Image: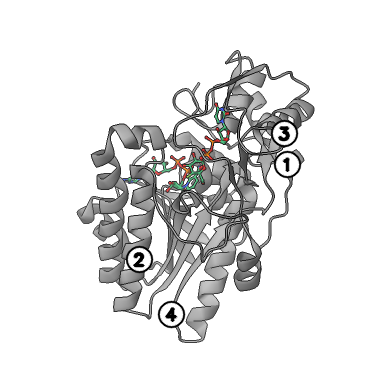
Amino acid sequence: MNILITGGAGYIGTHTCVELLEAGHEIIVVDNFSNSLPVALERVEKITAKSVLVYEADISDSQKMSAIFSAHVIDAVIHFAGFKAVGESVKEPLKYYANNVNGTLVLLAEMQRAGVKTLVFSSSATVYGLPETLPIKESFPTSATNPYGRTKLMIEEILSDFYLADDSWRIGILRYFNPVGAHKSGQIGESPNDIPNNLMPFISQIAVGKRDKLRVFGGDYPTPDGTGIRDYIHVIDLAKGHLSALNHLAETQQKGMGELLTVNLGTGQGYSVLEMIKAFEKASGKTIPFEIVARRSGDIAACYSDSSYAKQMMGWKPLYGLEDMCKDAWHWQKNNPNGYEK
Ligand code: NAD
Ligand code: UFG
């Protein structure tokens, strides 16, 4: 297939590019490099020994998007492009609504104009808000607790309206849990611009000597060790989930049908912050100093998926466990202490 990937230079995008190229697909990346660097895609080319066609463009630029859709025959779009920092979204909501929601509207309009009707969209477990029970199923009620989460919910609703208006579209909404880890080569991985907000990159930076100590947000949650529990998923498994979604939607197309499919991509297994520290110490041989501080506002005690629907619908299941997640995150960090920056 010829697949257009928005935000393909980012953390999840680069890993998905590798999986797609290795599966024999042709890819075209559109990225404005607002949160990534072109070198990430050069690394993708190095890993796969294949070339990647890259357009430096903003997905909100309808003229450029229209020209890209005119220049190529595109079978499907995987849509990663967007901003993702929860805290920043609270401070600058307009930036998030403009980029995430408006960007998606422009993309959809251009897809519609070009007659490209297969889309895989990056949603997030954040759309479950504060789940009443665990594990989280796709049928659970959705809500948002911050502007970033609201952009994901809004886009899901837009996609649902879009599908209602024309049910010949094939749309896969993938709700990611907590992506971590890196490619086995140690060539691509997560490269935060600033002080990492997320647990795993913060721990990796401590291990490599860039930060002193982890602040564990809350030791008094109603969990076995009092720290927050999340469903960490290896980024390679997540990337493979996009292939499974595309294959599934292609089967739907072959049947002459349309579909709107919403699935969780998680492992179904939750780990606490203290368990993550221990696992990373084991994988890296480094000590991770930490102190338990107050809860972070907006955090929930525990969040993990029921991942059986993704298996049932797309035949996808995660292959990697916690040991690989930590080992591969460490391999990347050790090889690239400053991420992609020189
Ligand atoms: P990332 O920031 O590494 O990648 C996003 C990419 O999109 C970047 O390369 C950025 O430059 C590009 N981009 C942003 N706005 C753009 C625009 N208007 N036009 C063109 N390119 C643009 O993020 P990621 O971790 O790879 O996440 C990818 C997607 O998955 C995002 O939509 C994110 O919200 C979603 N998601 C991520 C996580 C996570 O924890 N990483 C969890 C759930 C969902
Ligand atoms: N944590 C710490 N210290 C830190 C960072 C995190 O103790 O310095 C804790 C958090 O309190 C939480 C756990 O580690 O218990 C995981 O936190 P992350 O920030 O890594 O991830 P979140 O689950 O808070 O959020 C992430 C993304 C969201 C996304 C969500 C679900 O940041 O955008 O996963 O996909 F919506």
Q: Earlier in the sequence, mark 4 or mark 3?
A: 4
Q: Amino acid at mark 1?
A: Leu
Q: Element type at marker 3?
A: helix
From the viewer's perspective, is 130 left or right of 202? left
Residue contact between numbered discs 2 and 4, judged by CB atoms under 8 Å: no
Q: Earlier in the sequence, mark 1 or mark 2?
A: 2
Coloration mode: one colour
Whether 239 is drawn above or below 278: the answer is below
Q: Earlier in the sequence, mark 1 or mark 3?
A: 3
CA–CA distance in space, label 3 to label 2: 37 Å
Q: Position of residue 185 (x, y in %)?
A: 68, 39
User: Comparing marks 3 and 2, which lies closer to the viewer?
Assistant: 3
Q: Amino acid at mark 3?
A: Glu
Q: Position of residue 153 (x, y in %)?
A: 37, 56
From the image, tell me which residue sits under label 2: 159
User: Comparing marks 1 and 4, which lies closer to the viewer?
Assistant: 1
Q: Residues within 10 Å of mark 2 (few under 14, many from 20)?
A: many
From the image, tell me which residue sits under label 3: 275
CA–CA distance in space, label 2 to label 4: 13 Å
User: Comparing marks 1 and 3, which lies closer to the viewer?
Assistant: 3
Residue found farthest to the left:
63
**Residue 258, labelled with which disc?**
4
Q: Tally the numbered discs.
A: 4
Q: Position of residue 192 (x, y in %)?
A: 48, 30
